[in-house]
Image (cartoon, rainbow, N blue to C red):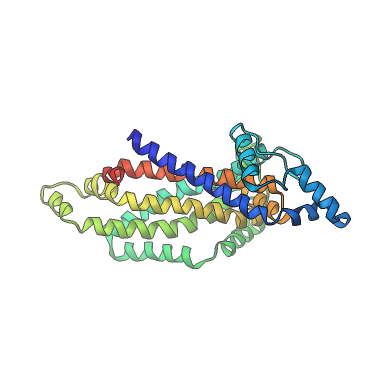
Amino acid sequence: MISYIAKRLGTGIVLALLVVFITFLLIGTMVEDVARTILGQSATPETTAALMAAKGWDRPVPVQYWDWLVAAVQGDFGQSVYTSLPVGPAVADRLAVTLSIIVPALLLTVVISVCLGVWSASRGGAADRIAQGLSLTGYVVPGLLLAIGLVVLLAVQLKWLPATGYTPLADDPVGWLRSITIPVVVLTIGGVANLTAQVRGRMIDELRKDYVRTLRTRGVSSTAIIVKHALRNAGSPALTVLSLEFIQMLGGALIIENVFALPGYGSYAFNAALQGDIPVILGITAFGVALVTVVNLATDLANGWLNPKARVQ
């Protein structure tokens, strides 16, 4: 197991370094435009070159990458070009806001999807049609339209929840819960639509296998067969879908954060890209890749626990 973890972790680190380096290459093609944007109307070839030299943007990309990497390992991701604030703490704060809606949404997605998928696969008939109908609804209804509809209903008409804004958990736990409820519901509906279909399909395949029939002939209860055997065997592919769902939610956070005016990771990344704030873009890329790497590693470990053959592969 230790060698399995080391192999997966090493692969994740190499991937993270490669992605950040590619980001450096892409940014290297736009640094001159960014320098002109910072200088504004007073930009001249001389002042642009001077600013690039002062920021170190005129150096070879591998040199810039190495210096940034050495500083990043020590926790220094530079300062924002526009605000002069440290990038690391700023990205961490905004990532915490985004994770505060993604993590609850993922937990609800897992619970609801497993219940619906198992119920649909084991019962069939009307239960199957209801579960598939709910899943199809999540596919058909766009997240943006759903978010607007929930805001109109729950915030504007019923006035149960705030329409926009974010309350930190440390300041007011109840206010925090109220501020994330609608965004979490929107993300959960989309996640359930994807994961329920996967759980249902895998459970149907497992329940049709010979070992299930053998267990039934031995008098093992249906609940024990589903929970102890079929669900565990069906869990590995579902975990892969769940990790992809996390990445999708992280990418979709931009829309959710803009709709609900949340000071999160997605909106911060969007604004940094528009402004050409190079240190912030690099910090966001590094944090994002590290987060995805951790999630993929956790998924691989869970798959290895559910399916020992995965550790060999």
Q: Is residue 179 visible?
A: no
In the picture, which quadrant includes the N terminus? top left
Left or right of 146? Residue 49 is right
Give the residue at the far left of this rendering. 218
Give the residue at the far top of this rendering. 74
Q: Is residue 61 visible?
A: yes
> Which of 190/293 is in front?
293
> Which of 249/277 is in front?
277
Q: Residue at the spot x=73%, y=48% of the render?
A: 58
Give the residue at the far front of this rendering. 60
> Which of 73/240 is in front?
73
Query: Which percent across, then down, holds residue 171?
Result: 66, 35
Left or right of 195? Residue 126 is left
Q: Residue at the spot x=62%, y=33% of the render?
A: 75
Query: Which percent across, then down, holds residue 146?
Result: 56, 62
Quarter assignment of residue 195: bottom left
Give the residue at the far bottom of this rendering. 140
- Note whether 111 is above or below 123 in the view shown: above
Q: Residue at the spot x=74%, y=39% of the render?
A: 85
Query: Which percent across, then down, holds residue 270?
Result: 66, 54
Q: Residue at the spot x=49%, y=68% of the render?
A: 140
- Note whether 89 is above or below 275 in the view shown: above
Query: Which percent across, then down, holds residue 76?
Result: 65, 35
Q: How many marks?
A: 0
- Note whether 87 is above or below 165 in the view shown: above
Left or right of 236? Residue 228 is left
Quarter assignment of residue 3: top left
Quarter assignment of residue 4: top left
